[in-house]
Image (cartoon, rainbow, N blue to C red):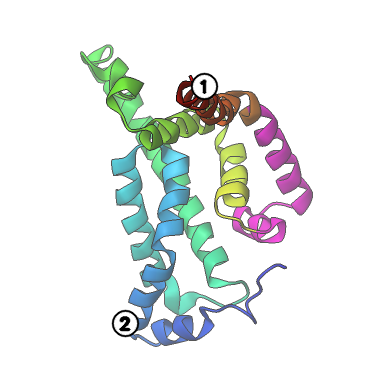
Amino acid sequence: MTETAHDDPDRQLVQQAAAGEREAFDELVRRHQTRTHNFVRAMVSDAGEAEDLTQEIFIRAYRAIGRFRGDSAFRTWLFRIATNAVRTHVVRRSRWRALWHRSSGGEREGDATRGDPPSAEDLESDIVRRDSIDRALATLSEDLRAAVTLRDVEGLEYREIAQVLDIPIGTVESRIFRARQRLRPLLEPLVRAPAAAGGAAGRTNHG
């Protein structure tokens, strides 16, 4: 069931924070920082950028909490701030990259490979999995990535996603469907790999 402003578990804390109680806002941060960071991480891929953006989002929320009208749940409002922050960051980053290319006449040595992940042999399996998911999400447009991340990673209802992204529910459904269709062939190896490893282990143990 969709969470509304009336049954928002954060409602009292939001009211206290809006009245200037810093401890109440700190508790809101503790409740929502992991999910907010996970969303940002999926949107920008780079771990360092995600950390910085997450901090920026909560700074924005702290400054704006007094203007929060309560017409949606706090987490919906927070994800809206996060979405806007990510969009601003993406635009800013693209402008800096364009400026660098114009001023330097090309990439610096090593820039072309800076974003490449380390080889699988040097990483733990969970890091490899995270990198594979990041790569798959990076193939999506920002609109599709935001919709599918809010639904499949953060677990928001379609109505909440529509509020966060300020689009009709039908558009939310369409974006999530298209995103899943595009992600499926890219993520299938992650699903098959554990099963194949388990089968190999089973054959080894019985050999």
Of the 4 image quadrants, the one containing the N terminus is bottom right
Residue reaching furthest to the right: 170
Placement of 83 over or under 177, stated as above or below:
below
Placement of 3 over or under 18, stated as above or below:
above
Count the marks. 2
Q: CA distance from mark 2 to mark 1?
A: 56 Å
Q: Residue at x 30, y 50 (%)?
A: 52
Helix, strand or loop at label 2? It is helix
User: Badge 2 is on which residue?
Assistant: 23
* Segment colored magenta: 157-182
Q: Quadrant of residue 148?
A: top right
- Say if the magenta span includes residue 162: yes
Q: Quadrant of residue 160?
A: bottom right
Question: Tag on residue 41?
Answer: none
**Position of residue 111 measured from the top left corner of the image (x, y, whole percent):** 26, 19
Residue reaching furthest to the left: 109
User: Badge 1 is on which residue?
Assistant: 203
In the image, taking residue 130 as reference, residue 77 lies left or right, namely right
Q: Residue at x 69, y 41 (%)?
A: 176
